[in-house]
Image: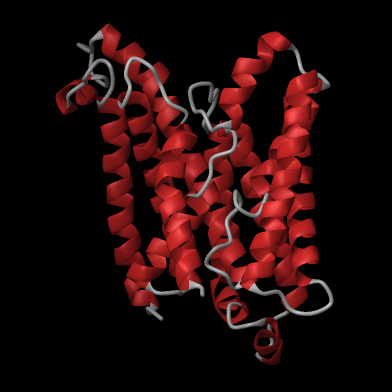
Amino acid sequence: MPGLARVWPSLLVLSVLSVLTLLLALSIGSVHVPLSGLLALFGSNADPLHQTLVIELRLPRALAAFGTGGLLAVAGALMQVLLRNPLADPYVLGLSGGAAVGALGAMLLGLGALAVSGSAFVGALVSTVLVFGLAHGTGSWTPTRLLLTGVVVAAGWGAVITFMLVIGPTERLPGMLYWLMGDLAYARSPWPALSMLALACLVLAPLGRSLNVLARGPLQAATLGVAVRPLEWTVFLAASLLTSVAVITAGTIGFVGLVVPHMLRLVFGADQRLILPASALAGGSLLVLADIGARTLMAPEQLPVGVITALLGVPTFLYLLYRSR
């Protein structure tokens, strides 16, 4: 495992890459804004068109993408530690579906934003408990049992979502469908996702060493003095909360929580003291890049960003599934 001496340089490199990615998102689009134009936004001679385009449209969307991607990547890293399975992901295991069901139900009932957020969290938590409990059963889980359970639970949530779309108002159907496919076009504010991401990094940072031990198995962790059950419930709640905030911000976006932790482990090793904050930075950068592709590949039409992440994630998932044999 990499020592702490390697943590800060690695995080510094990822932070610089994250800033460059955000600048790229502010520059690229239907109207190109060069770096000099971005710098001029803070001066007295700023172009009004560039100010409106960047500050009111591109910046909130880029920050929402960064926060959402970071949340999903950290949630995926937590689930992979808890289940000791590199295939664990909030989307694959049904957490995103459960959060979407909770959020859609609250929306259809006309509840406020706080109730929508709470319902999404409850839906993600219920999905987590279902997958964990059913896959574990009376013995230990296996990768096959875990994946089958997650797929079945996700399919169940999909059926519930379809029913909600059928009974929902017709005029709201297109927007709901785009939101379910993962869409950042209607991300109103990036601050809930960014605030939750920062809070998660602060809360989870002291748990890195305990998570390293938990990754070896609950029996070894208990032998080494780790309070296994409280730690597992902390991971349960954290993964559910992070997923629910991501779903509320941008809908159900898949495979970010699968691809990012896996790639980081290949580069940096399995030390959670580095993987968790690195997942926040790399996951945010990946979703910002995916959103750039969603905005530009078929311009002036915009693709749901979930389409781009699926194109990246499905081959990675199949590769990991093949290796897990």
Examine the rendering and report whether any part of residue 117 can be seen.
no
For residue 142, side relative to residue 49 (left or right): right
Frontmost residue, 48 versus 2: 2
Pinpoint residue 225: horizontal percent, then vertical percent. Answer: 69, 87
Examine the rendering and report whether any part of residue 46 can be seen.
yes
Frontmost residue, 151 versus 136: 151
What is the quadrant of the N terminus in the image?
bottom left
Pinpoint residue 78: horizontal percent, then vertical percent. Answer: 59, 62
Pinpoint residue 197: horizontal percent, then vertical percent. Answer: 54, 47
Residue drawn at x 33%, y 46% is 18
Number of residue marks:
0
Identify the coloring: secondary structure
Q: Residue furthest bottom?
A: 223
In the picture shown, does residue 271 fall above or below 168? below
Residue drawn at x 67%, y 53% is 151
In the picture shown, does residue 223 fall above or below 11? below
Pinpoint residue 322: horizontal percent, then vertical percent. Answer: 46, 68
For residue 87, side relative to residue 169 (left or right): left
**Image-quadrant location for residue 206:** bottom right
Residue drawn at x 50%, y 49% is 255
In the picture shown, does residue 141 fall above or below 188? below
Frontmost residue, 4 versus 182: 182
For residue 190, side relative to residue 62 (left or right): right
Frontmost residue, 255 versus 225: 255
